[in-house]
Amino acid sequence: NAGVTQTPKFQVLKTGQSMTLQCAQDMNHNSMYWYRQDPGMGLRLIYYSASEGTTDKGEVPNGYNVSRLNKREFSLRLESAAPSQTSVYFCASSVDRGFYGYTFGSGTRLTVV
Amino acid sequence: GQSLEQPSEVTAVEGAIVQINCTYQTSGFYGLSWYQQHDGGAPTFLSYNALDGLEETGRFSSFLSRSDSYGYLLLQELQMKDSASYFCAVRDESPADSWGKLQFGAGTQVVVTP
C-alpha cells in the first residue's frame, strides 16, 4: 500500500507564480488535511476536508485554495506564490476524525524566490 | 484558542530514559496524541490518550492527566534511531468547531548520543 502520496517532492517557484500540490490516499479515508511546517513552529493546518465534497479553513489559509477532487485526492493551490510560503507542506488523511492517528505523506519542500 | 507547550530539545545517552512533557490549554478536549518525525521525514503516529493514565507500547509510553492539562511521552532504553522530533497534538472541539482538528506543539528534538 502506498498510503498517502504527494507530488512533487521538491519545487522552486518565483514570486508570483502559481502551482498545485497534489495529494492522493489509497486507504479509503474520509478526511484529508494540508499542513505546513516551518522551523520551530510545528505543523500548522492550512485547510482540511472532513469528507468528500466539503472543505474548511484551518489556522493559516490565506494565500491558498484547495480542491477535494474525489475521496482519494485533495489538492492545494498557491495562486500567487510569496517568499513567506517557503515551507514544507504535508498532506495527511484519517479515518473520520482521526482519533487513532493521521497518516502523513512524505512532504513537498517548496522554495519561493 | 489553544496552546501547547513542550521543551525544544532533550539530549540523552543510549540506554537512558527520556520524558517529554506537554502542557496544553484548550477550549474543549478530546485527547492527546504523540507523533515522531525523523529529519527529512513525515510525522508518524505514536500514541493517543483520551483518558487519564499511562498507555504503554513497547519502549514508548504516554501519560495523560486531564485535571492538570498535562501529558508526557516516555522513551525507554533509548536507541540511536530514536533521535527525532516528537510532537504532542491536541484535538480541540468546541461549539464553533465541532470537527475538532488536531493542533500540534512546536516539537521536541531528542538527541541520542553514544
Image (spheres, grey):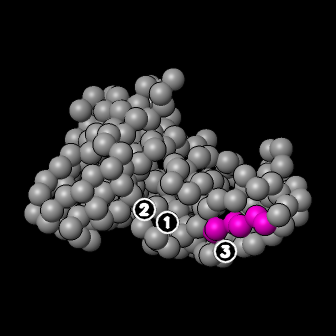
Question: Which of the two discs, 1 and 2, labels the residue nearer the N terminus?
Answer: 2
Q: Please tell me how crowded label 3 is: few (under 14), some (14-19), or many (20+) other residues with Cα within 10 Å.
A: few
Q: Which numbered tag is attached to residue A70? A: none
- Say which of A72 and B59 sits in front: B59
Amino acid, disc 3 = Glu
- Check contact, mark 2 vs mark 3: CB within 8 A: no
The label on residue A42 is 1
Amino acid carrying mark 2 in the image: Gln
Q: Are marks 2 and 3 on the same chain?
A: no
Question: Which residue is denoted by mark 3 in the rendering?
Answer: B9
Q: CA distance from mark 1 to mark 3?
A: 13 Å
Q: Quadrant of the C terminus of chain A?
A: bottom left
Disc 2 chain ID: A
- Label 2 near label 1: C-beta < 8 Å? yes
The image quarter in which residue B79 lies = bottom right
What x and y, as percent, mark residue B54? Answer: 83, 54
Residue A14: tell me if it is visible.
Answer: yes
Q: Which residues are magenta?
A: B108-113
Q: Is residue A17 magenta?
A: no
Instruction: Assign the magenta stretch its main secondary structure.
Output: strand
**Residues at marks 2 and 3, CA–CA distance in whole angstroms:** 17 Å
Q: Chain of mark 1?
A: A
Q: Residue at x 42, y 62 (%)?
A: A37
Q: Write down the residue under mark 2.
A: A37
Which residue sits at x=88%, y=55%? Answer: B77
